[in-house]
Structures are given as structure tokens and as C-alpha cells.
Amino acid sequence: MTVKISVITPCRNAARHIGDTVRSVLSQYAVQAGRVRLEYIICDGASTDGTIDIIRQFESPLVKVISEPDKTMYEALAKGLARATGDVVAYLNAGDHYHPGAFDAIAEVFQSKTVSWITGYGAFLNEVGSIVEVKLPYRYRKRLFESGMYGNWLPYVMQETTFWRRQLMDNLDFAALSEMRYAGDYFLWKAFSKRNRLCVIQALLGGFRTHAGQLSENTAAYRDEVSKICRTPNMVDFAVMAWDALFWFAPVGVKKSLNRDGILRYDNRTRQWV
């Protein structure tokens, strides 16, 4: 059965980068070959810089466009997520992009494994779109999501490389997500972690582009908002975090040996994710 993937892009006044982001979704090899069905929802916050004119050029049966005022980026995201009908869901911010073969890997993993949500290599791009840094996550734990460790003491979960089954959003508080200003992604990850663990796949799925004026520049505000939705870390949390931190920058083989079921690697001999 063909997997349907829903992607949401919330944006406002993103004319400089929105075209590259949209093209990275529509040019997926799996979409063009019909191996994956795409639902792409772009939620524009009533842009005034020509963003909507660029987006309208891509409008089609695959691309739905919503353009209306919203209070925050996460209000726009919540609108899109609430409308998603795919088997698998993700969101991609303006400026970020997907690797052309990402959806093939996503479809294969979700069809062959009982995972609920996955994340791949964290890839960082410079202003012009060159990949300048790549890191494979080690492990994600429920208790460390609950205590706000990721993005504070351990690396962030990268949204542009994270995908989940739509059922994870059952009973998700979209109204609360809409009120977030900086850490709406962490709101999602914390909610998802209560239901299932986040698995890692050794694949380059997407990349985060660094550019001036992006919301993620305000790390202090992000961490403050995370602290408001998380409990205060205790000594056990810090002990577990310190143990995990030892292996975040270890070789991939070491990470896999210590997190055998939580990291999936592609076996070229069997052509399977193991």
C-alpha cells in the first residue's frame, strides 16, 4: 500500500527562501515516481513581501494554500496539522529543505517497522544552502523530554528531519500549540514522547538552514518557554543526561551497539532497515 505523507509549512514574509523549501518537497523522487502520495499544506500568515505570490505558483491538487492572519507561527502550524490526512506527518519551516531521497526512506521505515516517530541525521546548512555539518543523534528518552533536557543540555530534536504517524496527534491540544511562540516543536516532541519513543534512522532526510532573522535565533526565549511546559530536572534526570552525553559524539557503530533497537541502519546486502 502506498504511504501518504502530509507536510506542513508555516510561513510569513519568507519570500527569500520559500521557493527552495517548496521545491524540495515537490521534487522528492518518491513523489515524482508515485511511490509516495503527497499532501502539502502551506499556511501563510498573510505575508506582505510577495511570499503568497510565490506560493500560489505551486498550488495544485498536491499543494493546498491557506493565507490568513495568525498570531504566531505555531498557530499556523496547528491549522495545518489539524487538516493533515496522511499516514505520516511532518512540518518543514521556510528556508529548510528535504533531501531528494528522504520520502523513500521514510516510506520504507514506516511500512517495515513498528516505529511511531523517527528522526535522521541533523544536517546544518549555511545561508546559501551548502551542507556544513552533519550529526547522527544517539538516543531520546521520555524522562529527558519531560525535564526539558533537549536543547538545553543535549542537542535539539531537528524538526526538518522528524516524521511521525498521524495517530500520535490523536488528542493533541492544538489550542495549546497555537499559543506557543518559540518552542512549539518541543511541545510536540514532549507530547509524542508520552506515547512512544523517538527512533533514529541513519539517513539524511532534511537540513536546517541558518539565516538572519529566523525565530530560532532567540535561544533564551526558546529555553524559557520550554521550562514552562516541563518539570524541573531532578538528580536522576541529570545523571541519565550525563551518561547519554558521553555517547552523542561517539562513532555510529558505538551508538548502534548501545542503542540497538533505537537506531536503524540500512543494510545494503539485505536491502532492509535493521
Image (cartoon, rainbow, N blue to C red):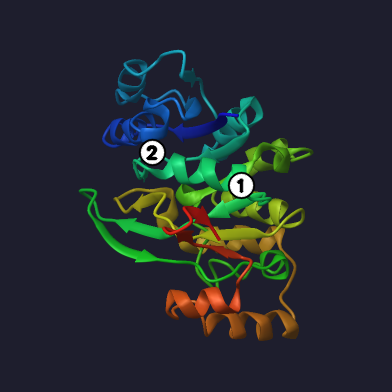
Label 1 sits on a secondary structure element that is: helix
Residue 234, quarter of the rendered image:
bottom right
Residue 250, quarter of the rendered image:
bottom left
Front position in the image: 218 or 262: 262
User: Residues under labels 2 and 1: Cα distance?
Assistant: 31 Å
Give the mark, 2 or 1, whose residue is nearer the N terminus: 2
Front position in the image: 25 or 17: 25
What percent of the width, then of the height, locates residue 201? 51, 58
The amino acid at mark 1 is: Ser
Q: Disc 1 marks which residue?
A: 112
Label 2 sits on a secondary structure element that is: loop
The amino acid at mark 2 is: Ala
Q: Relative to residue 137, is residue 3 depicted above or below?
A: above
Q: Residue at x 52, y 38 (%)?
A: 73
What percent of the width, then of the height, locates residue 115? 66, 52
Q: Disc 2 marks which residue?
A: 94
